Image: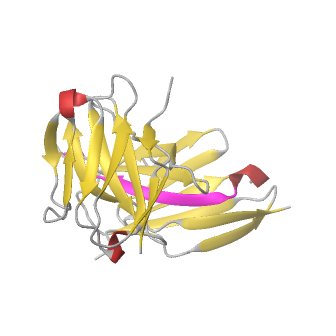
Amino acid sequence: EAGVAQSPRYKIIEKRQSVAFWCNPISGHATLYWYQQILGQGPKLLIQFQNNGVVDDSQLPKDRFSAERLKGVDSTLKIQPAKLEDSAVYLCASSPWGSYEQYFGPGTRLTVT
Amino acid sequence: DQQVKQNSPSLSVQEGRISILNCDYTNSMFDYFLWYKKYPAEGPTFLISISSIKDKNEDGRFTVFLNKSAKHLSLHIVPSQPGDSAVYFCAAENSGGGADGLTFGKGTHLIIQP
């Protein structure tokens, strides 16, 4: 079974630029999550999708972050404009309906200079 | 305010001995707990979990203990092996609502000494 795929793996941008990350979850997984992991911290939930609907985006900085999951499969997370404090690893995870276990992708390491 | 705390940033254990990683939580609504293992440049991988209706769950060399009254859980690895060297994250979930994102601790870096 293929795991959660993310791209790109690494991205370096200047502050005020925009960036987008892509996630392809495990086939058949209804729930998709985006987490932000700042160096030295644990992952922090940004947004949760159930199929193509948003379940929880309470911790998403909506003035600069946006996410979508079209057709209930792939998802993109966008930052516009980026700030220095957005430097982090962005992790995508998915889980089957009704399961507590989440399966993580390798993450995208973003550096904002 | 951190709802899940792992107070030991690192832990060094000799190969073959027991590794004990600790985790405390403050939110009494958490009812499901998970441990994840993370190698550098990889995403976290699920290791073991426990529901709040249990006090122990075992899977091979890994055992998780839950003390609800103390809001404390621990992960025991016996015997410890070199491949166990990684960062271990404790995570908690409130399964009562529709949103079930995990709340993570900061992690403990386990180093297994040969």
Residue A59: give x, y in percent of width and height.
Answer: 20, 62
Residue B102 shows in the view? no
Q: Main secondary structure of the magenta part?
A: strand
Going 68% across and 60% down the picture, which residue do you hit? B19
* Quadrant assignment, res B5: bottom left
Which span is picked out in magenta?
B85-97
Q: Please, which residue is most extreme toward the right here? A: B114
Which colour style is shown? secondary structure
Q: Can you say which quadrant of the picture contains the C terminus of chain A?
A: bottom left
Instruction: Tell me: residue A97, above or below residue B109.
Output: above
B87 left or right, relative to A100: right
Q: Position of residue B101 (x, y in %)?
A: 28, 50
- Residue A108's place in the image compared with A15, above or below, is above
Say if residue B16 shows up in the picture.
yes
Up the image or down, B41 lies above or below B27; here it is above
| Magenta region includes residue B90 | yes
Q: Residue at x 45, y 53 (%)?
A: A108
| Nearer the observer, A33 or B92 | A33
Q: Report x, y in % for residue A35.
A: 34, 55
Residue A11 screen position, x and y as percent: 45, 58
Does B104 appear in magenta? no
